Amino acid sequence: MADAFRHRTSDHDVSQNIEALLDAIDGAPPHAILDLGCGPGRDLRAFAELGHEVTGLDGSAELVALARAGIDCPVLHQDFLDLHLPSVHFDGIFANASLFHVPSSQIKRVLAELAAALKPRGVLFCSNPRGENEEGWVDGRYGCFYDLTTWRALATGAGFTEVHHYYRPPGRRRAEQPWLATVWRKSDDVDAATVPQ
């Protein structure tokens, strides 16, 4: 399964998303980046090749093993619902096609934990398939398909301020853009003590 996933996603061009995260981070590189839901490491490699200090995280032991074999950087095996991240550590978190797997009952807590792991004014990038707030199992995987209004309320409620958003893939009519990409900055009044338990 992990090899099939790697093969299926290896040629996806997410450079627009990587640039959206990096362009929003204050200060000069290199930046400390967490690739949340790193899978087999495609985007880890891209960040490392750009000179950043990258850490991967995935819930699949098979995908973590592939990522560790393919790139020399820390890759954590953690469930999104049981994160153990260092506080105030990352300049940016790249959550490309990953956070929509978190149940809606848990997403605000998970987002707050990500905010706590970011340095002041740190940046969270998210790309999720958009929808009308449907939730459930699709092809054996759990997903939440938020509209912009709902996703915005969840992220701001967890301590983020919106930088900007866009739809993907670029150059198509909105009806042909199934992905909602959002860029968020950690609000100034968020610290590790505000993470809901």
Image (cartoon, rainbow, N blue to C red):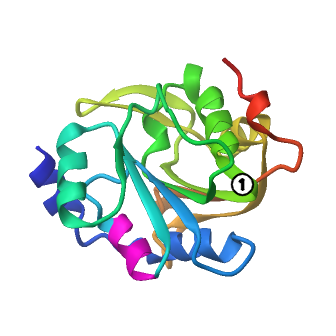
Prevailing SS of the magenta stretch: helix
Between 109 and 11, the one lying in front of the other is: 109
Q: Quadrant of the N terminus?
A: top left
173 w.r.t. 140: above or below: below
124 w.r.t. 191: above or below: below
Indicate the position of residue 161 as horizontal and vertical percent values. 80, 52
In this figure, what is the number of numbered marks?
1
Quarter of the image for residue 137 reads top left
Q: According to the image, label 1 marks what residue? A: 119
Q: Residue at x 49, y 25 (%)?
A: 103
Is 72 magenta? The answer is no
Residue 174 seen in the figure: no
Between 187 and 16, the one lying in front of the other is: 187
77 w.r.t. 197: above or below: below
Residue 67 seen in the figure: yes
- Specify whether 12 is left or right of 79: left
Q: For the residue marked with disc 1, what is the amino acid?
A: Lys
Residues packed near mark 1 inside 10 Å, few (<14), some (14 to 19) or many (20 plus): some
Q: Residue at x 45, y 77 (%)?
A: 15
- Specify whether 36 is left or right of 108: left
Q: Residue at x 69, y 40 (%)?
A: 116
Q: Which stretch is magenta? A: 43-50
